[in-house]
């Protein structure tokens, strides 16, 4: 029994507040762990002597396990429940931080396979957590789903921003090992707390439907949302992954300034999500959902025209704002099409995102010896433009399998 609004001396409002605090704080803690390996690049390159090829390859297990974890979690949510998935995801993220810490203890020779295991665990944790982290805000706030989902992704952005800042502070104090230690402890504490706090049940548990009902899989509209997430992620993942190299090598910024460019991207993304969340209190989410990809396309094309350091940094801040709300809105809009399959839909849309985040930068790396980054960025503008067309199709077609919202 979930204990959700079941009495026991705790008001329904108190239970909802406790659950919301757990979910949103948990999103912050998890995302700090998810950015820990990338933020620790200096340690991997200078202390463990990773080559360019080794460093670039450590994220392949992350993308693979994130995708498989998200797909598997969509099905497991029907059997285990969202609470169990959140516990498993948090434990996997805690284990990933143990591997990150172990990499500097086992020596350079064994560090590489340990890091590969760590990034695999990180991807698994992120993928498995995608279902509960995107479903619980909608279940907690059924009359403000879009705002709730964008809100959790804004908190995620804060975690992604705070992680690198914490690494910088600890490296300055020669105390980097405190990073994996603290993040492992925080994610372990999160898993324990999830077992104790009452959380809302999956809406499928109250509808009497059998787990054999896979209506979204049979709907072309559902796969439209997955493809939209994939195409969008090709653009966002490439912008984020190649930002530092573009600013450093193509625009001649120093290493600290180039790093600031990436920080501005994440800051813009976080602030943009807060802005989108406030806008949705006044306007429908669908128009915002369709406009944002055009802003992403404009950013990609504009990389050819920014030449000064200031304008290049400003462009990546704008890129973060442009990328801010589209993915969380994709999840919330898709969930409205399939209100009885929130966890499954969130997992599969996240799987599309994970594939795009990995494929986009990888393909760009293969093409970079032949074309400059500015031309590749401009070519990638076709992906967010395609998202606009597909989003229009999805808006015009309600899924035939989506029954009335049980909320």
Image (tube, rainbow, N blue to C red):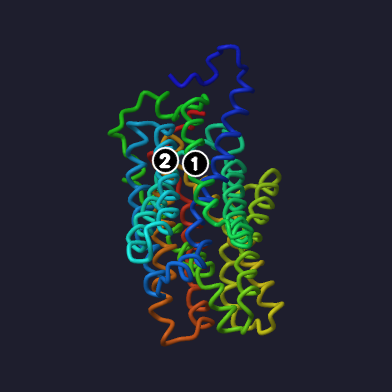
How crowded pointer 1 is (Cα within 10 Å; few <14, some 14-19, many 20+) is rated as many
Q: Quick one: SS at disc 1?
A: helix
* Label total for image: 2
In-front residue for pair 212/200: 200
Q: Position of residue 37 (x, y in %)?
A: 47, 59
Q: 10 Å neighbourhood of mark 2: few (<14), some, or many (≥20)?
A: many
* Residue plotted at (61% across, 70% down): 259
Dot 2 and dot 1 residues touching (CB under 8 Å): yes
Q: Is residue 32 above or below residue 300?
A: above
Q: Position of residue 156 (x, y in %)?
A: 57, 49
Horizontal and vertical percent for residue 142?
A: 57, 33
**Distance of label 2 from label 1 (alpha carbons):** 7 Å
Q: Is residue 402 left or right of residue 5?
A: left
Label ID, residue 91: 2
Between residues 129 and 141, which one lies in front from this camera angle? Answer: 129
Q: In the figure, residue 321 lies in which quadrant?
A: bottom right
Q: Is residue 125 visible?
A: yes
Q: Quadrant of the N terminus?
A: top left
- Going from N to C along the chain, the mark reached first, 2 or 1, is 2
Q: Residue at x 51, y 56 (%)?
A: 35
The quadrant in which residue 359 appears is bottom left
| Label 2 element class | helix
Pinpoint residue 332: horizontal percent, then vertical percent. Answer: 52, 45
User: Label for residue 187?
Assistant: 1
Among all residues in the image, which is located at the extreme left?
212
Residue 287 shows in the view: no
Residue nearer the viewer, 373 or 382: 373
Mark linked to residue 65: none
Q: Is residue 206 above or below residue 345?
A: above
């Amino acid at each position: 029994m979930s204990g959700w609004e079941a009495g026991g001396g705790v008001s329904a409002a108190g239970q909802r507040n406790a659950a919301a605090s757990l979910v949103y704080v948990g999103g912050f803690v998890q995302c700090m762990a998810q950015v820990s390996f990338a933020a620790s690049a200096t340690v991997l390159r200078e202390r463990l002597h990773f080559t360019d090829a080794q460093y670039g390859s450590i994220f392949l297990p992350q993308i693979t396990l994130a995708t498989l974890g998200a797909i598997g979690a969509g099905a497991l949510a029907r059997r285990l429940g969202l609470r169990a998935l959140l516990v498993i995801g948090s434990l996997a993220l805690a284990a990933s931080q143990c591997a990150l810490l172990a990499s500097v203890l086992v020596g350079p020779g064994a560090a590489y396979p340990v890091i590969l295991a760590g990034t695999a665990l990180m991807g698994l944790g992120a993928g498995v957590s995608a279902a509960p982290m995107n479903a619980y805000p909608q279940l907690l706030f059924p009359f403000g789903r879009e705002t709730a989902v964008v809100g959790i992704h804004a908190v995620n952005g804060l975690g992604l921003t705070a992680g690198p800042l914490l690494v910088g502070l600890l490296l300055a104090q020669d105390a980097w090992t405190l990073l994996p230690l603290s993040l492992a402890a925080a994610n372990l504490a999160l898993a324990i707390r999830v077992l104790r706090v009452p959380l809302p049940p999956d809406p499928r548990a109250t509808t009497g439907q059998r787990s054999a009902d896979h209506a979204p899989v049979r709907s072309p509209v559902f796969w439209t949302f997955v493809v939209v997430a994939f195409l969008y992620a090709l653009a966002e993942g490439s912008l984020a992954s190649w930002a530092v190299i573009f600013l450093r090598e193509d625009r001649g910024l120093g290493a600290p300034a180039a790093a600031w460019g990436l920080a501005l991207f994440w800051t813009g993304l976080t602030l943009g999500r807060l802005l989108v969340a406030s806008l949705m209190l006044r306007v429908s989410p669908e128009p915002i959902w369709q406009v944002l990809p055009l802003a992403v396309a404009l950013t990609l094309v504009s990389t050819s025209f920014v030449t000064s350091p200031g304008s290049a940094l400003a462009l990546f801040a704008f890129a973060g704002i442009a990328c801010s709300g589209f993915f969380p809105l994709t999840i919330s809009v898709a969930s409205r099409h399939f209100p009885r399959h929130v966890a499954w839909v969130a997992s599969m849309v996240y799987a599309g995102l994970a594939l795009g985040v990995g494929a986009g930068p990888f393909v760009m790396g293969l093409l970079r010896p032949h074309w400059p980054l500015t031309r590749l960025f401009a070519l990638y503008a076709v992906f967010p433009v395609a998202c606009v067309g597909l989003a229009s199709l999805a808006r015009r077609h309600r899924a035939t399998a989506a029954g009335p919202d049980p909320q």
